[in-house]
Image (cartoon, rainbow, N blue to C red):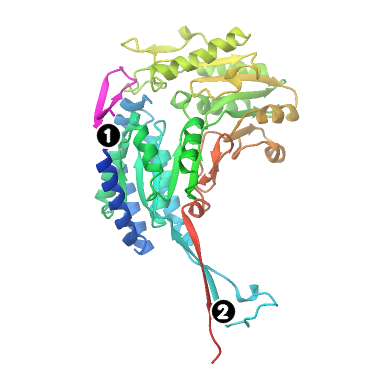
Amino acid sequence: MTESLEIISPVDGRVYARRHYATDTDINKALDLSVKAQILWQQSPLPERQEICLAAVDALLNKQEECGEELSWQMGRPIRYTPGELDGFAERARYMIGIAEKQLAPISIDDHCIGDNSVDQKGDVTRYIQRKALGIVFSIVPWNYPYLTAVNSIIPALMAGNAVLMKPSMQTAITGERIAEAFKEAQLPEGIFQHLFLSHESTHKLIASPKINSVVFTGSVSSGKRIEQKVAGRLIDIGLELGGKDPAYVRADADIQFAVENIADGGFFNSGQSCCAIERVYVHADVHDQFVENLVETVRQYRLGNPLNPDITLGPMVNTQAAERVRTQIRQAIDKGAIGCVDVNDVIVESDHNSQAYLAPQVLTNVDHTMTIMSEETFGPVVGVMKVTSDEQAIQLMNDSRYGLTASVWTQNQQAAITIGEHVETGTWFMNRCDYLDPALAWSGVKNSGKGCSLSELAYDKLTRPKSFYLRKLQQ
């Protein structure tokens, strides 16, 4: 196994940082420390956990600019946006901390719930359900939103009394260090949160360890399926968020300019490298041409270039291989008759080197579902726009996918939005919004977009186990 990992920056193709992989000895030491520390942590008062987690959020925000610059170098997002990821981290963390007391409280059972056939009489029995920590939660975090995805599992897991082992992506490995520093500053007991730089082989070994009680993963479908195989027979819970091919439907009654601005942001922010990015757009025939014209004009305003320049609005993709995969999808679509509406020369390109990770945004029309650009996850700065003539056709096309993470409708008719949403196979349904996680709502997917859920009050159900108490008082 290679002894160190290299973070190759998409900004200029150079090695930005090196880190040593954890050895088997390092991993075993971390596991043993977690097991011992978690026993005491789960017994700590909830207000103490709240205070520590809130302090960690504040500590991380105090390094917002520094973390933002590091993130731009590691994965290429423009620096005008990267510090803002920590604002999202804080929003989700504070919400989950805020609801913890209610969600982790014992569930009392009303005496009146005892059936008429019970051998016990009313008042002789006390019943309640406790929520107990699982033990050690292994959180495997992706590179595209490393802070935002990490918080989904880490904060509620810690609040529930679990210990957490985090594997940051090799591309954004430094983020694990920053989170660990924040918890240390907040005086989290040693061993409750640890991060490990792991190879794929070591990751799979750790997943299979009997000391791991839950695995939370965000990433590709293929990797998610391998994780399922690794935990087979272990009888532990896993949470998998595996990506999407998220659709938007623009109805004839939509506010077209509002829809254009927001769909463009949902499709091209972070160079389209988001699991819930808009990748396919279905537009009613009555407004199709106007929508396309306005969308193309909006996309032409992007400035592609070095993400460390604060004027840049679109940075490189994470690496050359990712950019080439998107270029291939675009070429294949055009070969089948799709029309590329954006000339690369129309996009302002500012770069002082020839890295192939820089990819101009594209809008494709005359597309259909025989093209991979409309059926397979693209994860890049391109959207396909398809004309439809009815809500029913839009629903059929939105559901014609092996993914189901989020979907959106753009309309001024809320009842129509609800009716359509009831028929669309998705984890989250938006009206006049997209590409956003509300921490009060369960984040989940259907079909190949994953299993389980994070965020909302339901997240605590996934990070705890119920323990029932039946206390019968004998008659004197």
Picture coordinates of residue 60, whole percent (x, y): 31, 43
Crowding around mark 1 (Cα neighbors within 10 Å: few <14, some 14 to 19, many 20+) is: some
Residue under the image location 52 percent in, 45 percent down: 453
Residue wearing tag 2: 125
Residue 403 visible in the current orientation: yes
Q: Read off the residue under disc 1.
A: 21
**Residues drawn in magenta:** 1-22
Dot placed on the residue nearer the N-terminal end, 2 or 1: 1
Q: Is residue 274 above or below residue 288?
A: below
Q: Nearer the viewer, residue 309 or 98?
A: 98
Q: Position of residue 342 (x, y in %)?
A: 53, 11
Among the 4 quarters of the image, the one containing residue 65: top left
- Which kind of residue does numbered mark 1 sit on? Tyr
| Magenta segment includes 3 | yes
Q: Report the mark closest to the observer, 2 or 1.
A: 1
> Which x, y percent locates residue 51?
33, 57
Compared to residue 450, the image places residue 301 above or below, namely above
Q: Position of residue 19 (x, y in %)?
A: 25, 31
